[in-house]
Structure formats: structure tokens, C-alpha cells
Image (tube, coloured by chain):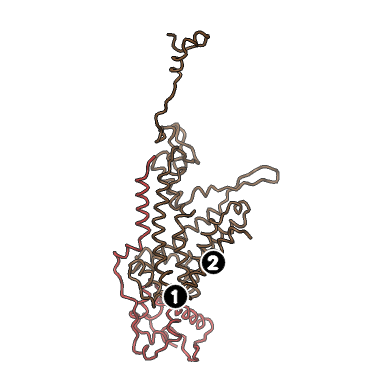
Amino acid sequence: MNDKGKIIAGIVIFFVVASFPFWLNMFLEKGPAPELVLTPKAKAAEKCVRDTQFMTANHMQLLDEWRDTVVRKAERIYVNAEGKEFNMSLSNTCLDCHSNKAEFCDRCHDYASIEPYCWDCHIDNPKETK
Amino acid sequence: MNVKYFYSFLAVAALALIAWVGCDLLGLQVLFGVILPYVAVVVFFVGFFIRMMDWARSTVPFRIPTTAGQAKSLPWIKPNKIDSPYTTGAVVARMFFEVVTFRSLFRNTRMRVNPDGRISYDLELWLWLFALAFHYTFLVVILRHARFFLEPLPLPFEILEKIDTFIQIGHPIISMSSFVLLGTVLFLFFRRVYLPNIRMISLASDFFPLFLIFGIALTGILMRYFTKIDVVAAKELTYGLVSFSLPTMARMQEIGSIFYIHVFFVSVLLAYFPWSKLMHMGGIFLSPTRNMANNSRAVRHVNPWNYPVNVHTYEEYEDDFREKMIEAGLPVDKKE
């Protein structure tokens, strides 16, 4: 049996499929670069709850901890390493400075194709009241 | 302690150490994040082609399909179309189910000697189950990584991610596939360690890929859930790799070393793939016992490199010795 032609055809198909990251991007419309825009208020504050490096990588974990602390222990005050106090609230603390969701949160989330379920409740819905 | 898996384990641990020292202490992010991945991808594709062509050149002189059902014979005997394929279409169907559902592995049995001395063969489905889970979760994990290479992510990948995370445990939401992958790798490893007969036939080349895949899954899980990395910086690098527009060196250094260990593991796996048992990925399609139609009763298959052989037939023999045979009283076909 001589099936070299069929085998090469199969290999070529596999190679085309397996190399999809290299050519599929040509058919996709690239979104905006993940460059963040800080609001004047965020710029004025200079420092977030923790340092920037920690916030970039860990903000989702921090928010998760905040949620658990508020909902389960009813503690609303977060004290950071410098002893500064914050109200543990996404809507009232985070989004107070970073009120530009489209130019701040969404830029990176869209770039990394992440759809956090925070927005299922927050922002578009009425602000939470004390 | 078994030398075969201990050395494989040491090899993988050494790889992790090399990537960690290289990136964390020596700052060789370009080597581990750019050069080695490109080399690995090229080695993978070239090696895959070489191995497949090596098999394509190999001769398959005989029809040797292994069957597990009634072959097509008389019209009133019902043939088993998939387990004893007769046409090319049936071969394709058989191959499809072999690749997609591992039917051969489903027939895995274990021999047992009962207390009364009788032998019985029991279905042994754990390997089939875990192998199936392992391969499918690995595929899902690979496809989920498309989000690091495509921008924006096409809808099918998003749907896959939604399905994979639908339980919504924790934050970031747990992807079931990562943990099933880790668990099944552990099963495949402990199977080779605990079953004496399997341990006996296991080689270092069986353990090394298992440890390597375990390392890949573990570093991936660590990055996603525990020691976080800057995902956007990571995507800038991975997207840069496939679109040939790399980020700056400073940006590459912002990604944690664990990312480079992960990428180094994957590079090693890709480069190792074509030269290892992992080539069963391509080899399954070239298995003569699976990819041939069982039609030897209906079709005469002539060995393709048969050359004309000089034979001395009985007629010629009789021509040579007819007189002597008649003289000796032996029966002959033609009496001059």
C-alpha cells in the first residue's frame, strides 16, 4: 500500500489547525491596547489600597477577600500596611476613584478576555447604600 | 524507590530550577520566553513531519486489521460493521470512534485467578475512564489558552471557557479542566507505581512526560489561583510571540518567574513530543491493525513489492523425469 499522499495531506491539515494562533489573528479585529487611563481623582490619590504591582496581579483576590469579610463577618474597614483605613466596597471605594470603567477596568479585562462577574451587580445597578 | 521514576522526577525538577535560575537570577527572559519557545515549536513541527514520514515509508505488506466482531461473509450472517470494517467508510468510522472514544482501551480486561482455581477476565474500565478524562481536559486546557494568543477571543473559545467555569467557585473562577487534568495525571502516575506488572514494564520515558505534564498543570494552577502574575504583561508576550511583535525587555521582566518555568516546561514538552511515545497522537492514524479494511476474503491483496519468482512447477518436473518415472512404475499425468 502506498498512502504517502493521504498521509501528507493529513499532516498538512494538522499543521494548519495546530498553528492557528499564528494565522487566526489576521482575521480578527484587534481591540484597543491595554493602556490604562487614570481619572484625576485616582491621580491625586497617587496610591491605591496596596501598591500598583500587587493590585495589577491580585486585585481580584483582594476583592474576593473583601466580599467574604463584609458579607460573612460584617466588617467593613480594611487597614493596609501603612495603617490607612478603607471602606471595603467595590462601588464606594474602588469605583469612586476608578470611575472610568471603560478606560480602566475593561481595557485589561477585554485584552485578556476576562469577564468578571462583579459587573453582574455593580455599576449599572443602583449604588449600594449604607 | 524506583530509579526510573526518580530520575524522571529529578529531570523535571532540574528543568524547573534551570528556568527559575535563568529568569529570576540571570534575567534570561528572552531566552526562556522567546528563543526557546520558537525553537520548540519548530522542533515540534519538523520532528512531527519526520516521524510521520518515517512511518509512511515503512512497508505494510499484509492486511493485518485486528477485529473484534463478525467479518462480512455470507449474506445471512450479520457483519459487525465497525469492529470488523469492510469498506473504507467503515474504517473511517472505526478510526473516528477509536480516536474520539478510545474503544480499544474500553475493552481493557484484567485476568484474575479465582479462589477455586478458575480464571476469569473482568472489565477494567478505570484506565479508559481516566485516559479519556486526561486527554479531553488536556485539549480543553490547550484551547482555553487561546485567550493568550488571540485578540479578541473568538466566540467558540469564550463559550468553552464559560462551560469550563460554570460552577463559579472562588475567584478567579475555578476551571474544572485544570484540576481534572492534574488529578488524571496523578492517576496515570500512581497506576504505574502501584500495579506491580505495570511498574515492571514502565520506563523512564513513560514517567518523564507524566512528570512534565504534572509540572505544567501545577505551575498553571499556581499562576492562576495562588502566586499571581501580571496577566496582561503575560499576554503581551504570548501575543507578541504569535504576531512577531515582542514587548519590551522591561515589560517581560514584570511577569513572575513561575510564568517562565511554565513556558519552559511547555517548550520542553513540545520539543520532546516528536521523539517520544507521545507521538501516538499521529501514530494512531497509521496503525495497520486499525486503519485497514478487513476484506481479505473478497479482495486479493498482493504484496506490492513482489517480484517474479522463478519456480519449477510439477509439470516441468514431470517433463524432466517422465521416462524415469514410468520406468519406476510411478503414476504420471501425461503419458507421452
Could you tell me residue B237's position as x and y percent?
38, 71
Could you tell me residue B98's position as x and y percent?
46, 49
Q: Label 2, label 1: how many angstroms apart (C-alpha)? A: 20 Å
Chain A palette colour: red
For label 2, the residue is: B13
Chain under numbered label 2: B
Residue A47 versus residue B94: which sits nearer the camera? A47
Q: What amino acid is labelled 1 in the image?
A: Gly
- Give me the residue at 34% from left, 86% from top: A39
Marks 2 and 1, the one that precedes in the sequence: 2
- Give me the residue at 64% from left, 60% from top: B1
Look at the image and tell me whether residue B229 can be seen: yes
Location of the N terminus of chain A by quadrant is top left
Give the quarter of the image for residue A52: bottom left
Chain B palette colour: brown
Residue A97 versus residue B324: which sits nearer the camera? B324
Could you tell me residue B200's position as x and y percent?
61, 52
* In the rendered image, residues at marks 2 and 1 fall on the same chain: yes
Mark 2 or 1, closer to the camera: 1
For label 1, the residue is: B27
